[in-house]
Image (cartoon, helix red, strand yellow):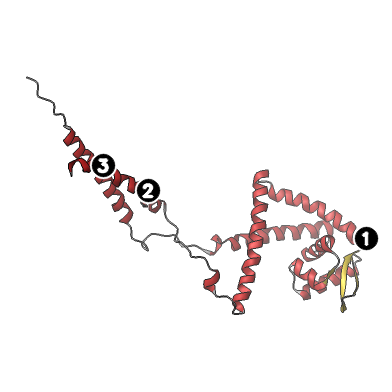
Amino acid sequence: MPSATWLPCSHDHSKFQQTQWHNVIVDKINLSSREKPGKRAQKPMIITDLLSSRLHTLAALSAASTSLRVERKFSLTLLEWRSLGQLAAFAPLSLKDLAHRAGMDKSYASRTVSGLIERGFIASERNDADARGVMLTLTAKGQALYQQVIVDAEARNERLLRPLSKEDRQRLMTSLTALTERARQVLDEERLIQAGKLSDADVEPVLEVPLSARDVEAQIDIVELRGLIDRLGQIVRPFG
């Protein structure tokens, strides 16, 4: 005589479902609390992970290759090229403004400009707004040299951007514009802190400890948890 097959009644089936849902909730709660805050194995950030460090490295490499190229092809130093470029775009400029735009100390700017004036690339005229100062512009010779160098610079720029697609280039330029503007804001904030008009607490974001993939997986989804509890309640309610 064949043995009878056990079939769960509706009561037993509901009890089984109840146990299943209970176990799911308990497992989620246990998983989320398994690792306590502060005990996560975090890889410490190093200086080369910082945006400023990466930008500095990129700028240094670009400047080094530019310096070699403009000296080899046009007998210019990097500072001389920067001075010509700034004057071509924004002349007339005072020595102070040129130094600021080219990222030079004023004494370096003075020596650089003097050499370019002697070579006939820059002209200086009295500054009507400041009798002690002069305004700088490119001469016709300086403008002609600039046109040669900028064409070469565009080719070098394309060479540098070669690994990036057109879309990536657009995103990069947009990001750099936003970051440059934010960097100016951060500088203004630091100056206000230095002057005692702001505190670090006023400007510094609250840093969140990055979560590992395991931590993210272990986080309890509140909406999901509520759904599980509601479902468990529906199973338990008929037997309450």
Q: CA gap, disc 2 to disc 1?
A: 71 Å
Q: Which mark is residue 140?
A: 1
Looking at the rendered image, the quarter that the N terminus falls into is: top left
Q: Position of residue 212 (x, y in %)?
A: 42, 54
Q: Quadrant of residue 82?
A: bottom right
Name the residue rendered at 17%, 36% in the picture: 11
Above or below 115: residue 24? above
Earlier residue among tags 2 and 1 = 1
Residue picked out by circle 3: 234
Identify residue type, mark 2.
Val
**Is the residue marked by circle 3 packed among few (<14), some (14-19), or many (20+) residues within 10 Å?**
few
Q: Position of residue 56 (x, y in %)?
A: 64, 62
Pick the front one: 53 or 118: 53
Question: Which marked residue is nearer to the observer: mark 3 or mark 1?
Answer: 3
Label 1 SS? helix
Identify residue type, mark 1.
Ala
